[in-house]
Image: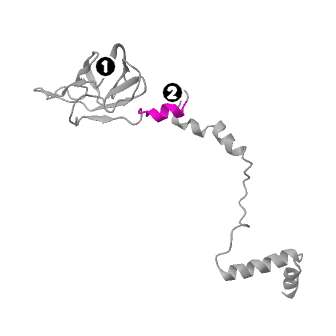
Amino acid sequence: MTESAGTIYPPVSWAQRFDLLYIIIDVECTNIEHKVTENSFTFKGVNALDASKKYEVTLNFLHPVDPEKVTSKNIGRCMEFTIYKKEKGPYWPSLTNDKIKLHFLKANFAKWKNESDDEDEGPADAPFNDMFNSSWNKKFDDMGLEDDDSDDDIPSLSKNDEDSSDEEKQNAEGGGKAAAAEAEQK
């Protein structure tokens, strides 16, 4: 792939799920043109802030996609394309069939989902933060753990602490007689 005269590659990120791909053009553009075929994705646009910057990119997919099931959203600062794989799974090791790393293409980990994530979660749209909801916290409540901040079971770190600890225990066991005697002396 080479840049043609007057055009540059836009920053592109991608993510995948078991049945679909996300391609995000990470720049605000106008005059947008895009085309998805079974084997490729083409994008053209003009930078919204600098009309002298014209973007163009063609990505050759590693495996076939369904060009009839493509949706796009113009989010303002970027364009997001949802493209369904022709065949669900397995996960693709890369987006394109290019043998070299494309400097403008990176993974979008905010949208990324691994194969193991599909097994762990129920619905595909369940957000990661659901593990902190009340049902998750309820599991810990059911364990019978109490909010006890007592240091009674923590062993002493020095000999002096043990001696004073023994005196305190004797005072507590003796009904505080020694403490009462000390108070009378003062």
Mark 1 — residue? 64
Q: Give the residue type that dot 1 points to.
A: Pro
Side (left or right) of 43 relative to 79: left
Range drawn in magenta: 111-121
Q: Which residue is at the far left?
A: 5
Q: Position of residue 132 (x, y in %)?
A: 59, 40
Q: Position of residue 12 (x, y in %)?
A: 28, 31
Q: Is residue 160 visible?
A: yes
Q: Nearer the viewer, residue 93 or 105?
A: 93
Q: Is residue 117 located in the magenta-colored stretch of the structure?
A: yes
Q: Nearer the viewer, residue 29 or 50?
A: 29
Q: Which quadrant: the C terminus?
A: bottom right
Label number found at residue 125: 2
Label 2: element kind: loop
Residue depicted at x 24% and y 34%: 104
Label 1: element kind: loop
Q: Position of residue 102 (x, y in %)?
A: 22, 34
Name the mark nearer the viewer: 2 or 1. Answer: 1
